[in-house]
Image (cartoon, grey):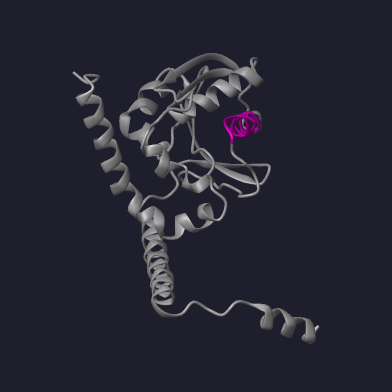
Amino acid sequence: MASTLLTRVSSMKPPLTGRAGRIAAGAVAALTVAALVNRILARKAERDNPAVGRFVEVDGVRLHYVDRGAGDAVVLLHGNGSMIQDFEASGLIAMAAGKYRVIAFDRPGFGHSTRPRGTIWTPQAQAELIHRALEQIGIARGAVLGHSWGASVALALALNHPKTVSALVLASGYYHPSMRTDVLFLSGPAVPVLGDIEPYGIADFEPAAMAFAAAEDLRTSASAGQVP
């Protein structure tokens, strides 16, 4: 075994030297610092924003959700870059809970819900997860509201489990690929390797980059006469 290890070591390419080596070392150092800062900020954010609801375990995924009100069920599914708190802040949960039983989920990887890396989390995969979670918490049928990317999950849920969905409300749904600058920044977590690195440093700089991209999209639309 030792001879095999020596053979592998001797066959390795020499490390980068000169300017390329300094650039590589600088990049590694920057990522390391960013990862440490991100870890500190993430822990602070979790302390400042504790889970507001309950948890249900489905196929190894720990889903965070809130359950408010009574009556016919209404299920809320948020979009990318969002979480339960967005529905809370808008007042939607409080208003709907006055008449319905409102279930709002943190989709896998958002808020306090986990996102196992061994699964490709397509709308269909997330719809299956939500369906099984609803079964566990005693929801057999209800209206489903999906916002943005969550609209794709809501549609998949309705198509694959029509008996579960009594009505669909689709808000700003993202149904077909289109040339949007922000997609470049939101697609990172789905890319192998990059998706593992991104949450530990790169993601810290994404909000500013996304804001710039959104402003550019608005400027381009205005120049084309698409925005009044």
- Please identify the residue farthest to the top as the structure is shown: 167
The answer to whether residue 76 is seen in the rendering is no
In this view, the residue in front, 93 or 219, is 219
56 horizontally vs 23: left or right: right
* Image vertical order of residue 204 relative to residue 73, above or below: below
Name the residue at 53% across, 45% down. Answer: 190
**Which quadrant of the figure has residue 34?**
bottom left
Magenta: main secondary structure equals helix
In this view, the residue in front, 99 or 131, is 131
- Quadrant where the image shows the C terminus: top left
* Image vertical order of residue 86 relative to residue 102, above or below: below
**Which quadrant of the figure has residue 7?**
bottom right
221 horizontally vs 95: left or right: left
Tell whether position 131 is magenta. yes
Q: Position of residue 178 (x, y in %)?
A: 43, 27
210 horizontally vs 139: left or right: left
* Image vertical order of residue 40 relative to residue 153, above or below: below
Name the residue at 24% across, 36% down. Answer: 215
Q: Position of residue 1 (x, y in %)?
A: 81, 83
In this view, the residue in front, 85 or 126, is 126
Tell whether position 149 is magenta. no
Q: Which residues are magenta?
A: 122-134
Q: Position of residue 39 (x, y in %)?
A: 42, 63
- Please identify the residue farthest to the right as the structure is shown: 1
How many discs mark residues in the rendered view?
Answer: 0
The answer to whether residue 143 is seen in the rendering is yes
